[in-house]
C-alpha cells in the first residue's frame, strides 16, 4: 500500500490462534479495528461514547494470503478509499515481518448517533480525515 494514513505494529497473541496454531481469521478484523481506533484517537476524534454514538461496521471484506502463528509480528496499514456523507471506507493491509501481504481488505463504518441512526460526519471529523489524507 502506497502512502498509508496510519501504521500499527503488533504480535499475534496465543489466545488469537486456533487449534492449528494459526491466527484465527476474525482476529484480522480485531487488529484492523484497533488500528482504526488508534488512528481516530491520534486525530482527536471520537471512537465511541454512549451519549454521542460511534462508528459501527456495516461492511467488511478480506482476502487472506498468508497465515500468522503465535508470536508472529505484523503491521497494519490503513488508508481511506472513500469518505462519504455518513461513512468512511477503510482499506487495509496486514503485513508480516518480511513485508509480505498476509491479508488485505476493506471495511465501511458509518457515523451513528447514540440511538444507532446514521448522522453526517461533523465538520471536525471531515476536516481531520481529509487533512490526514492530504498529508499521507
Image: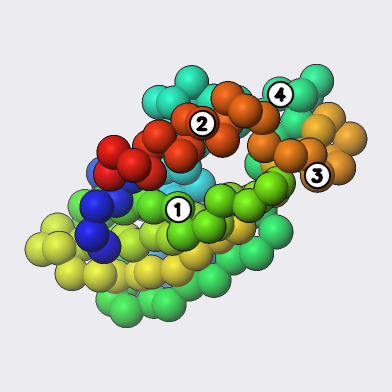
Label 3 to label 4, Cα distance in Å?
Answer: 15 Å
**Residue under circle 3?**
118
**In contact (CB < 8 Å): disc 2 and disc 3:** no
Mark identifier at residue 49: 4
Task: Indicate whether 106 appears above or below 11.
Answer: below
Single out the mark in the foreground, 3 or 4: 3
Nearest to the observer: residue 91 or residue 37 = 91
Disc on the earlier residue, 2 or 3: 3
| Relative image position of residue 35 (x, y in whole percent) | 41, 42
Task: Indicate whether 71 appears above or below 55.
Answer: below
Residue at 44% across, 26% down: 43
| Relative image position of residue 76 (x, y in whole percent) | 32, 52
Single out the mark in the foreground, 1 or 2: 2
**Residue under circle 2?**
127
**In contact (CB < 8 Å): disc 3 and disc 4:** no
Disc on the earlier residue, 3 or 1: 1
Label 2 to label 4, Cα distance in Å?
Answer: 20 Å
Label 1 to label 2, Cα distance in Å?
Answer: 14 Å
Residue neighbourhood size for the residue with mark 4, other residues' Cα within 10 Å, grouped as few (<14), some (14–19), many (≥20):
few
Disc on the earlier residue, 1 or 4: 4
Q: Say which element carries label 1.
A: strand
Nearest to the observer: residue 42 or residue 23 = 42
Label 1 to label 4, Cα distance in Å?
Answer: 23 Å
Single out the mark in the foreground, 2 or 4: 2
For the C terminus, give its image quadrant.
top left
Amino acid at each position: 500500500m502506497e502512502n498509508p494514513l496510519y501504521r500499527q505494529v503488533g504480535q499475534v497473541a496465543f489466545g488469537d490462534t486456533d487449534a492449528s496454531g494459526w491466527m484465527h481469521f476474525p482476529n484480522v478484523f480485531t487488529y484492523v479495528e484497533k488500528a482504526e481506533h488508534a488512528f481516530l484517537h491520534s486525530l482527536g476524534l471520537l471512537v465511541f461514547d454512549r451519549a454521542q454514538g460511534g462508528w459501527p461496521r456495516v461492511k467488511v471484506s478480506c482476502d487472506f494470503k498468508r497465515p500468522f502463528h503465535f508470536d508472529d509480528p505484523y503491521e497494519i496499514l490503513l488508508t481511506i478509499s472513500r469518505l462519504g456523507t455518513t461513512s468512511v471506507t477503510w482499506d487495509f493491509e496486514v503485513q508480516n515481518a518480511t513485508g509480505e501481504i498476509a491479508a488485505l481488505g476493506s471495511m465501511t463504518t458509518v457515523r451513528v448517533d447514540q440511538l444507532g441512526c446514521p448522522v453526517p460526519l461533523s465538520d471536525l471529523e471531515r476536516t481531520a480525515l481529509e487533512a490526514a489524507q492530504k498529508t499521507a
